[in-house]
């Protein structure tokens, strides 16, 4: 085989593309075969069969599959491919489980994949997979649960390996395939699996093949993701509704008190104003700032699409805004609005909040700052619903109930591994890719550093309009073709 | 007849009490007869019959009843009783209509009055009215719609007149009886009636016989009532729910924005912080402040009863707090809390508010200050639900919808008429009465000054625990007995 270093990026891409062109029908059929297996993590019998199907795909490539197990969890399908002489080892992550489905909302069965000649919303018609012939128009879409999230990367990675082998090109790194089986359930056993199999999983970098490309359809690499933690705060008024004329200004109005408390925590531009909350924040590096500035501007188009007159953030772009920590209010309730509103003081009011975390905030640091702030405003913080005695005995009571959470992750962009990935991804996609310091949404990327000491990055390939997590999930074929080329570049030319 | 001036307060009260003791059964039966007439203002046939019944009570006393009418309204039952040589004229106001009922919530029929030997909640048993014999224990209660609100004053006033006549004591003033028929519907035609019958209604003072006595059961006189106006504010976010991780800090969060707006309007002690809002406020006089300080302190007992750890108002008493204007939040809503909460940014949020007004705020001054404030915070104020184009075209949109409203009224306590009333009421009730500058709740007392140039005051007699506006409304008989004595004092000894 040729050493990867002996072939340059454009030449590699040309050969991978030629392979794909010659094998489009079988690639789509292999993915469709995998999509025909129900894959909700809690559906134990079926998720085990899905794991076997993924294992057989490895086996087909001569990679011995292993099922990494901990009690109560679907197995991780794992396989290694050593490259003699390689200095570096990558763990290639994807997941074979998918979101639960609401069958009534789907056109057709979620696990009977269907190829359509355009998006459903544009009147796409079904094309029988049996009679499929190459070349397949690249705007066609394959519909089915997990088509894009996240079985396309499984098949795409293995296809990239097929293409390299067909071209006689050896990988440039040692490869470890790690296909998780419960990501959509929140990866509840991932930390335990990493703990148990830490020795086997020794590597220089994790690459997560999950998520969508940029709305502009340009390829992107994400170097991290915000963490998250959530809470509900309930404040209390009188123990029965009181006439607002006879008691207003004296009986505490819990809705007004809650508004004051919330407004003391977050300003109208979304900046968090809780004392000491921001102390642990690590600022973006100059490299990260430059990368954000270089990303395509989709804000105007998004404002148009979403009916937003003026974004929060005092002039920041969306990408800049989501690099900050966020206090997001999911909902607020207390008393009645609309036709059922009466001139009375409500008895309690509740707000549901998530915090999105950036390095080096932790759920613990957030919790401490938030509760110190609430206490500093005169509230006694309790966990349970207070009884009448507690309501009388405390000047102000706040019931604060936290959910679980985890910290953010942000792998530096200027590490040699990061620079190598950006270079390879750019070569494979014909120009610089978008480099995102962090996704705004949360992924527990922190766990790889925490459990293994290895840094993670993410390379998504799915179209952004893939109906992720919803009905009629789909994959635009051009995104899979692009993915195969970027995967091949990573396998063959990543080194640092 | 004796001239009123020739009998002193204690002697008068003794004679009125003797009359009442001798006539308890017929007084209760007369009130029960009136209570047996359905009296919801919108029930035209029945409210007309109620008016006739009230008219016949006047006629029975030799007072020629008139029905003051404007189109579409139940009539005011009106009668005059001139006192030769009297310098002053009082209009004695009560209303014969009552709140609508929810029959299922009543024990028995709301218009089949029942005497009970204790409050229902304490296991009170029914006492047949047919077999009633004096003396009737004064803690017994008469149950029925309008027993206390507001038919007891109608019968009480006429009984006071009976008692005076029986004792050979002439009134000290000219009397005009004014019994309204749609007070519980919000007095929608009162201003029109005052306009049309202004000449007939010429007087020196209106006395409103409506409302409950103090929670301590001490008699009180109220010299005014706060005004009111209400509104709903709706703020807007993206036109569909967005993932809070991917869009939080950029897509406007309408719940958080609403909290900020609200907190900018009202501080946690209930003080209104809207610029220029308070400019028109006329401070309490020294007399009014002293009167508040002299009122019995029921705050500790109320805190205990209502489960309030610490009232708003930074140390003010309830009575002091309700002399200030109030911004009362009835309810707030936006997104979801509790089990249905999702990590998304809501599309809109709404708050329902009432403002309680003090002199010389007006609904117009409040509206101007509130809307100027909202605009100063960058919002465009609209009345209708904005369409997609409006949402995109405006940086920040606030839909502000106002209800109706009216200003406060506060008759000075140190006017000669006010001082005379306090003196007479104190004599009749055996000690100083509580003097309230304003009730916290709203009554359109302003209309008498505005339409007739005559000042109003209020003298309530009902027990505070009368289930006003609710099911099982009732009147504690001792309150009626006390009322007859205070009414007689006013009729016989008011002069200035």
Image (spheres, coloured by chain):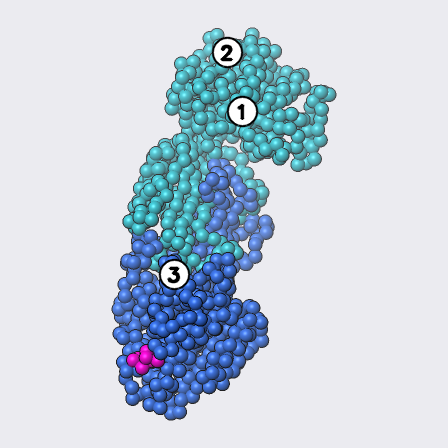
Chain colours: A cyan, B blue
Residue B124: mark:
3
Q: Residues within 10 Å of mark 2 (few under 14, many from 20)?
A: some
Can residue B195 be spotted in the picture? no
Label 1, label 3: how many angstroms apart (C-alpha)?
62 Å
Question: Can I make out residue A366 in this image?
Answer: yes
**How far apart, in angstroms, are the residues tagged by discs 2 and 3?**
88 Å
Look at 55% across and 9% down and name the residue there: A62
Q: Residue B127's x, y, as percent?
A: 41, 66
The residue stretch that appears in magenta: B13-19
Q: CA distance from mark 1 to mark 2?
A: 30 Å
Mark closest to the chain's N terminus, 1 or 2: 1
Labelled disc at residue B395 = none
Q: Of the residues tagged 2 and 3, which is closer to the observer?
A: 3
What residue sits right under mark 2 in the picture?
Answer: A81
Kindly identify which chain the residue marked by label 3 belongs to. Answer: B
Relative image position of residue B262 (x, y in whole percent): 42, 54
Q: Nearer the viewer, mark 1 or mark 2?
A: 1
**Cβ atoms under marks 1 and 2 closer than 8 Å:** no
Q: SS for tag 2?
A: strand
Q: In which chain is the residue bearing label 1?
A: A
Q: On the image, numbered disc 1 is attached to which residue?
A: A43
Q: What secondary structure predominates along the stretch shown in magenta?
A: helix
Furthest-bottom residue in this view: B85
Determine whether B289 is above or below B90 in the image.
Answer: above
């Amino acid at each position: 085989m040729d050493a990867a270093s002996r072939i340059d990026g454009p030449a590699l891409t040309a050969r991978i593309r030629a392979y794909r062109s010659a094998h489009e029908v079988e690639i789509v059929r292999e993915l469709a075969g995998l999509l025909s297996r129900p894959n909700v993590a809690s559906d134990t019998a079926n998720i085990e069969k899905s794991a076997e199907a993924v294992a057989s795909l490895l086996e087909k490539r001569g990679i011995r599959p292993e099922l990494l197990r901990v009690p109560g969890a679907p197995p991780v399908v794992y396989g290694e491919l050593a490259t003699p002489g390689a200095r570096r080892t990558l763990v290639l992550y994807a997941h074979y489980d998918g979101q639960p489905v609401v069958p009534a909302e789907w056109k057709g069965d979620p696990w009977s994949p269907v190829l359509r000649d355009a998006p459903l919303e544009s009147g796409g018609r079904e094309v029988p997979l049996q009679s499929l012939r190459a070349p397949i128009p690249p705007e066609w879409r394959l519909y089915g649960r997990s088509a894009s999230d996240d079985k396309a990367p499984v098949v795409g990675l293995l296809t990239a390996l097929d293409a390299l082998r067909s071209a006689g090109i050896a990988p440039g790194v040692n490869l470890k395939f790690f296909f998780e089986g419960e990501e959509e359930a929140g990866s509840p056993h991932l930390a335990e699996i990493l703990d148990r199999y830490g020795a086997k999983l020794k590597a220089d970098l994790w690459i997560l093949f999950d998520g969508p490309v940029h709305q502009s359809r340009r390829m992107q690499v994400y170097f991290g993701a915000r963490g998250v933690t959530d809470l509900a705060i309930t404040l209390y008024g009188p123990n029965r509704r009181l006439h607002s004329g006879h008691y207003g200004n004296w009986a505490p109005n819990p809705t007004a008190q809650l508004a004051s408390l919330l407004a003391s925590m977050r300003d109208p531009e979304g900046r968090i104003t809780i004392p000491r909350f921001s102390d642990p924040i690590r600022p973006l590096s100059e490299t990260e700032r430059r990368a954000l500035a270089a990303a395509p501007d989709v804000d105007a188009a998004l404002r148009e699409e979403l009916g937003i007159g003026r974004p929060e953030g005092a002039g920041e772009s969306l990408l800049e805004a989501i690099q900050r920590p966020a206090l997001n209010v999911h909902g607020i309730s207390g008393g009645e609005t609309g036709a059922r509103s009466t001139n009375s003081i409500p008895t309690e009011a509740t707000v549901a909040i998530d915090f999105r975390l950036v390095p080096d905030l932790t759920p613990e640091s957030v919790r401490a700052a938030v509760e110190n702030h609430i206490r500093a405003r005169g509230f006694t913080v309790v966990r349970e619903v207070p009884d009448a005695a507690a309501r009388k005995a405390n000047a102000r009571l706040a019931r604060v109930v936290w959910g679980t959470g985890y910290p953010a992750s942000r792998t530096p962009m200027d590490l040699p591994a990061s620079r190598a990935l950006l270079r390879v991804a750019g070569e494979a996609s014909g120009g610089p890719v978008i480099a995102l310091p962090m996704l705004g949404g949360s992924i527990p990327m922190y766990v790889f550093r925490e459990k293994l000491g290895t840094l993670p990055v993410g390379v998504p390939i799915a179209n952004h309009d893939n109906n992720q997590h919803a009905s009629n999930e789909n994959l635009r074929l051009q995104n899979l073709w692009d993915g195969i080329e970027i995967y091949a570049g990573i396998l063959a030319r990543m080194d640092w």
